[in-house]
Image (cartoon, grey):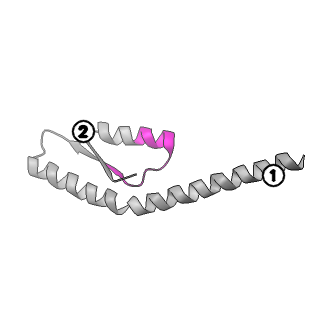
Amino acid sequence: MIGLVVATHGNLGAELLASAQMIIGPVLNARSVSINQENSMEDIRDAVLKDWKSAKANENREQDYAKRLNRYIVEVRRSETEETENR
C-alpha cells in the first residue's frame, strides 16, 4: 500500500483508521490528521505533509510485512495439502 493520510474534521480520520486496522490488521503507512476550527491553513498543511512523509517512510516496512504474511500463508496451505495427501 502506498502512503495514506486521512484528513478529516475532528477525530473521524483516526477512528476510521482504527476501525480499518481492527478488520485488516496493522496499517503501518497510514496516518490521520484531525482538523479543528482552531487550526490555520498552515497548521493543516504542515500536519498533512509531516504525516505523509511519515507514512511514506513506513511503506517499505509494510511491503516487507505483506511479503512475510504471504510466505506464511503459502507455507500453511502447503502444510495442509501435505497433511491431506498423507491421510
- Image height of 33 relative to 37, above or below: below
Q: Residue at x 30, y 36 (%)?
A: 12
Nearer to us: label 2 or label 1:
1
Residues marked 2 and 1 touching at CB (< 8 Å) = no
Q: Residue at x 24, y 37 (%)?
A: 10
Q: Residue at x 50, y 43 (%)?
A: 24
Q: Which residue is mark 2?
A: 8
- Image height of 13 relative to 26, above or below: above
x, y percent for residue 23: 50, 39
Q: Is residue 20 magenta?
A: yes
Instruction: Give whichever of discs 2 and 1 has the lower sequence position.
Output: 2
| Alpha carbon separation for disc pair 2 and 1 | 49 Å
In the displayed structure, does residue 9 sit left or right of residue 30? left
Q: Amino acid at mark 2?
A: Thr
Of the numbered discs in the image, which one, if any, rests on residue 42?
none
Frontmost residue, 40 versus 79: 79
Under circle 2, the secondary element is strand
Question: In the displayed image of the protein, which residue is found farthest to the right?
Answer: 87
User: How dense is the environment of label 2, judged by Cα within 10 Å: few (below 14), some, or many (20 and up)?
Assistant: some
Of the numbered discs in the image, which one, if any, rests on residue 82?
1
In the displayed structure, does residue 84 sit left or right of residue 34? right
x, y percent for residue 66: 51, 55
Q: Residue at x 66, y 53 (%)?
A: 74
Give the quarter of the image for residue 60: bottom left
Under circle 1, the secondary element is helix
Q: Amino acid at mark 1?
A: Glu
x, y percent for residue 64: 49, 62
Frontmost residue, 2 versus 57: 2
Q: Is residue 27 magenta?
A: yes
Question: In the displayed image of the protein, which residue is found farthest to the front?
Answer: 85
- Range of residues picked out in magenta: 18-31
